Image (cartoon, helix red, strand yellow):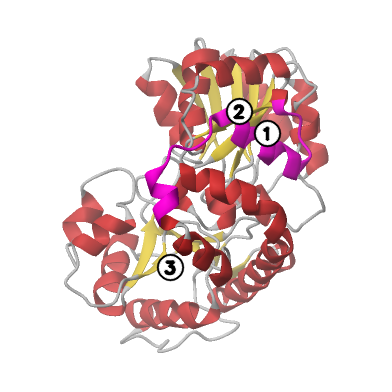
Amino acid sequence: MELSLLRAQAHSPSYFSLLRGSSEQLPPVDFCIPCNPYFPTPEIFEHLGRNLETILKFYPSDADTITAELCSTLGLHPKTVAMGNGSTELITWIDHLLVKESLAVPIPTFGRWTDQPLETGKRVDMYPLLESRNFALDVDGYVSFVRTRGSRVAVICNPNNPDGGYLPKHEVLRLLDRLIDLDLVIVDESFGEFVDAEPYPGVAAEAAVRPNVIVLRSLGKNFGLHGIRFGYMVANPALAGRVRDALPKWNLNSFAEVVVFMMKQYMSEYRESLKRLAYDRRAMFQQLSTMPELSVFASQGNFLLVKLPPGRDGVPLRDHLLTEHGVYVRECGNKLGTTSQFLRLVVRPQEDVRRLLIGMTQFLYSGSLHEVPVIGLHHRRVNPISA
C-alpha cells in the first residue's frame, strides 16, 4: 500500500486511488468514507448491471425532469428544490451566488463549509465546538457569536461531521427564528436520514416557506452510492430558483436518473437498511467503549468519532490498520477543530468491526497491561442510548 497517498492532500484519497496504489489482492475495508453498507440491495445492483450499456450510452433527461421525480417520491414541491452533482456542487453555487461577505460555521465540521468561502475571499467566522461539551452545539452561544462577529450567513451541519452530534428539531427551529434577519441560514442535513433520536427530524418543510433558509441533503451517502454524485437543496422558490437557474441543464448523470426513478419501488428496503445501520451503530459504540482510555462520542450519523488514549497518535495507527489489517480509517488531524488524536470510524457490519477492533487493540495495547479491550477500565462512554 502506497502510504504517501494518505499524506498528499487535505481530503482523504479516493477509494480508487487506494486501489491503484495497492499491490494487495483484496481491497481495503473502508471505515473512512461514510456510506450505507446495506443499500442498494443486490437486486438493485443487478438491475443497474443489466442496463449498464443503456445508462452509459445515452444522455440523461434534463435536471428538471429528474428533480420532478425526486419531489414526487419525497413529497416536495419542485419549485423549492435544486438538485446538484453531489452536495459539494451545491455548496459551491450557494457560496458564489448567495454568500456576499461573511459566513459563520461551527468547527469541527465538513471542510467545504470553511474551505469553499475562503477560496472565494469571504470572511469565515469559526465557532469552536468544545470537546469538554462533547462537541455539542449551544444555540444561544452560537447566536451570540454570530451577532458579535457580524456574520451575514450561518451554517450548521446536523448531524455534524465528524462527531455525529445532533441538534433536536425544536432547537434547530429556535436557531432559525433567532437568525431570521441574516442573509442566509444553511442547515446541512447530509446525514439526516441516519437519525433515529426522533421521527421526521429534518426541517426541509420549514425551509420551503422561510425567507432565508436552505436545507442541504445528500443522496449518495444515504443510498450508499457516492460514485453517482447527487444531492439536493430545499428552500423557498426564490432562493431555490436562483441556484437552479445557475446550474447546467444536464448537471445530473444517467445513473442518477435511473436511481431516482427506482426510489419509489425500493423505499421499504431503504428504510430497512437504515434500521440495520442504527443497530450496528449502537453495537459498534458499545464495543469501542470497552477499549481502555478510548473516548467514544455519541453519534446520530453513520460514523463514530473516537479520541485515542493519551500519548497516542492517529497517523501511525491509521497506517498500521491499512498496511497490517487492510482497514482504511479517517484520521482527523487535518480537520479544523480536532487533532490527529481523533479518528472518525464509519459504521459497518460486525464482521468488519471485528477486524477493526483486532487491529486497534494490537496497536494500542500490545505489550501493555491491556492485551485486549476490558470493560470498565478508564474509558469514556458518552450517552450510549443515543449512540
Q: Nearer the viewer, residue 237 or 362?
A: 237
- The question of residue 60 being in magenta is answered with yes
Q: Which of the two discs, 2 and 3, labels the residue nearer the N terminus?
A: 2
- Distance of label 2 from label 3 (alpha carbons): 51 Å
Q: Is residue 379 left or right of residue 310?
A: right
CB within 8 Å, label 2 to label 1: yes
- Which numbered marker is on residue 64? 2
**What residue sits 53% from the left and 58% below the top?**
224
Which contiguous range is marked in magenta?
Answer: 53-78
User: How far across and down, in percent of the image, does residue 101 sit?
Assistant: 49, 10
What's the residue at 71%, 28% (across, down)?
78
* Residue 208 or residue 245, whichever sits in front: 245
The residue lying toward the viewer, choosing from 312 and 34, is 34
Which numbered marker is on residue 68? 1
As for residue 203 lying within the magenta part, the answer is no
Q: Which mark is first along the chain, 3 or 1? A: 1
Does residue 141 lie above or below 134 as drawn? above
Q: Is residue 328 visible?
A: yes
